[in-house]
Image: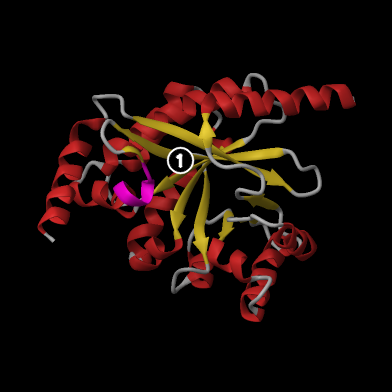
Amino acid sequence: MGAAIHAGEKLKNDLTTSLNRDEFMVHYQPQVQIGTWRIAGIEALVRWRHPERGFVRADDFVPTAIKNGTIEALGRWVFHTALTQLRDWQSIWSPPMTMAFNLSGPELMSGDIVESIAHALSDSGVDPAFVEVECDDKVLSSIETAKIRPVLERLAALDLRIAIDDFGAGAGSLMQLRRLPISTVKIDRSLVDGIVTNAEDEALVKAVASLGRSTRYRVVAEGVETDQQLGFLRDAGCNYLQGFYFGPAVPGDLMTSRLEEQRDRTLVAV
């Protein structure tokens, strides 16, 4: 127990100086549009190259960053870095893709998140219509609607897309869709995992996928890994897919190569 506590304290201390040491990097995972099978969106995901531990998973350090207050500075860095990358990609990509970013609860309620994002958008010159902020279903369910709705409405007023992430994992998913300015619904990977073996998960995924056919929502299924899942989601009418089936999150240079290959294939086809 003492060793675990010591390791936790060291992780906290390392996080406070890691940004200045240039230890973080952004990886990018594609979102593929069903039918065209083109990369229509990309999610930006932070990775930590710890000098002693090697690559540290986001699940292992983001909760600590939230607790010790470094998550806001880290989030701003990710946003600026990924927007610069998006600007470069859009110069070689047509039609433009959407870039998605995760926002934690403390970031949403920090008081200056709207101004911070607006500043980053202005610096990058990226059209806000192609930028999406993702808010976890559980986080949205844990914050009073009266407090979170004004923040999301101000973000939506910047012409950003607002996504509810891990939809189905929280307690108030359907109510959130009614009350908040959500434009994208991301089906939780736990539901996608169960669609082949669990009748309830299958029914829930079908119900959420139908939102994309009958409403304004863009629906993305996360955690797609198998042919069976792909076939089910396609038949259910899901709009977009994301997961290892289409590739893991990779550094910007590798994603650039993939986008260029896809662009070249399109030019040959034309």
Q: Is residue 6 above or below residue 166?
A: above
- Dominant secondary structure of the residues highlighted in magenta in the image: helix
Which quadrant is home to the C terminus?
A: top right
**Which color scheme did the rendering employ for the protein?**
secondary structure
Seen in the picture, residue 64 relative to 185 is either above or below; the reply is above
Location of residue 10 by image quarter: top left
10 Å crowding of disc 1: few (<14), some (14-19), many (20+): some
Residue 48, located in which quarter of the rendered image? top left
Q: Which residue is drawn at the image coordinates 61% and 48% (left, top)?
A: 244
Residue 103 lies in magenta, yes or no?
A: no
Which residue is more in the foreground, 153 or 28? 28
Task: Please name whichever residue, 219 or 63, is drawn nearer the observer in this view of the structure.
Answer: 63
**In the depicted view, which residue is nearer to us: 174 or 152?**
174
Give the camera-side residue of 59 and 213: 59
- Residue 188 showing in the rendered view: no
Q: Which residues are magenta?
A: 56-61
Relative horizontal placement of residue 169, taking residue 109 as reference (left or right): right
As drawn, 201 above or below 234: below
Residue type for callout 1: Leu
Picture coordinates of residue 64, whole percent (x, y): 24, 50
**Which residue corresponds to the image point at 48% horizontal and 28% vertical from the top-left?**
83
Q: Quadrant of the N terminus?
A: bottom left
Residue bearing mark 1: 45
